[in-house]
Image: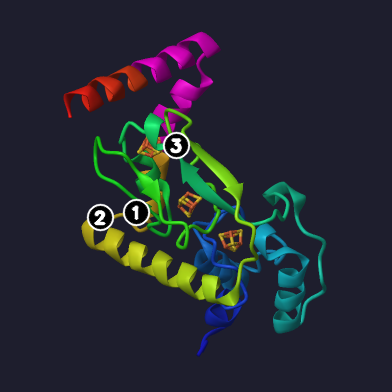
């Protein structure tokens, strides 16, 4: 049962942990609403219904969704093209709910039932082998419960192994410069980076 105001706000958030609100997950956003009077219209997955629920809880006016955070979209699920996965583990490090399994230099795959559709794994992938596909279903309250649980389990695990106050953010940010450097190069360089990575992956597979 929710006990604090943060708990009660968090209970109304979708728990996809997508960070589109500008915070490192749903609970940090809930804390910002409770403690720093953050606006209640920054959660695209929650949509208008979510804003209305927060407005009712907090006795505030209903606001229009803040479009700068993105638009509410149908639920999607990540799919990895395993033939092109080079096993770099960057997607695992980015996933807030441990929905990707794999190991260094081995093919990775997504556990669909765990995937929240947050798309945080897309940007770090150096071979662009992850796509977001329609989930053909709605996000349920049970999904939200599981999303919160998987996020909390991951946060606890990261904090056991890292001293940073927000290890997930630190690790994600640390990953992004190398990836965006490759991504922002001209098309020829980017294609070469990907071609080299794929050649290494194919060579490794031939040795298996
Ligand atoms: S679902 Fe995404 S945008 Fe909404 S509160 Fe959670 S992390 Fe923020
Ligand atoms: S697999 Fe990708 S889209 Fe799915 S929850 Fe993890 S990071 Fe988000
Ligand atoms: S980021 Fe892409 S290439 Fe790297 S392990 Fe994940 S799916 Fe494979």
User: Disc 3 or 2, which lies upstream in sequence?
Assistant: 3
Q: Which mark is residue 81?
A: 3
Q: Image check: 36 left or right of 181?
A: right
Q: In this view, does 105 lie above or below 54?
A: above
State yes or no: discs 2 and 1 in contact (Cβ < 8 Å): yes
Q: Name the residue under label 2.
A: 162
Q: Distance between the residues labelled 3 and 2?
A: 31 Å
Q: Distance between the residues labelled 2 and 1?
A: 6 Å
Position of residue 46 measured from the top left corner of the image (x, y, whole percent): 68, 65
Q: Which residue is drawn at 54% across and 47% down?
A: 119
For label 2, the crowd category at 10 Å Cα-Cα, with few meaning under 14, some 14 to 19 and many 20 or more, is: some
**Which one is nearer the viewer's eye here, 49 or 79?**
79
User: Disc 2 or 1, which lies upstream in sequence?
Assistant: 2
Q: What element carries label 2?
A: loop
Residue 120 visible from this viewpoint: no
> Within 8 Å: ligand 3 and the Cβ of disc 3?
yes
Position of residue 24 measured from the top left corner of the image (x, y, whole percent): 49, 57
* Camera-nearest label, 3 or 2: 3
Q: Residue at x 17, y 29 (%)?
A: 208
The residue positioned farthest toward the left in the image shown:
207
Q: Name the residue under label 1.
A: 167
Which range is magenta? Answer: 176-196
Q: Image check: 39 left or right of 170?
A: right
The residue positioned farthest toward the top in the image shown:
188
């Amino acid at each position: 049962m929710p006990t604090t105001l943060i708990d009660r706000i968090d209970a109304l958030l979708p728990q996809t942990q997508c960070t589109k609100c500008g915070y490192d997950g749903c609970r940090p956003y809930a804390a910002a609403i409770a403690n720093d009077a953050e606006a209640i219209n920054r959660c695209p997955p929650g949509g208008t219904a979510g804003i209305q629920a927060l407005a009712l809880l907090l006795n505030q006016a209903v606001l229009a969704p803040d479009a700068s955070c993105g638009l509410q979209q149908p639920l999607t699920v990540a799919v990895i093209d395993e033939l092109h996965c080079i096993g770099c583990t960057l997607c695992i490090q980015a996933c807030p709910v441990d929905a990707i399994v794999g190991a260094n230099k081995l093919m990775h795959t997504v556990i669909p039932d765990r995937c929240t559709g947050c798309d945080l794994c897309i940007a770090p992938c150096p071979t662009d082998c992850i796509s977001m596909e329609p989930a053909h279903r709605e996000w349920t309250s049970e999904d939200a419960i599981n999303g919160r649980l998987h996020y909390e389990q991951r946060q606890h695990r990261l904090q056991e192994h890292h001293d940073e106050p927000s290890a997930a953010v630190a690790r994600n940010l640390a990953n992004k410069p190398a990836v965006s450097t490759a991504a922002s190069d001209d098309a020829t360089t980017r294609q070469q980076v990907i071609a080299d990575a794929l050649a290494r992956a194919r060579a490794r597979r031939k040795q298996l």
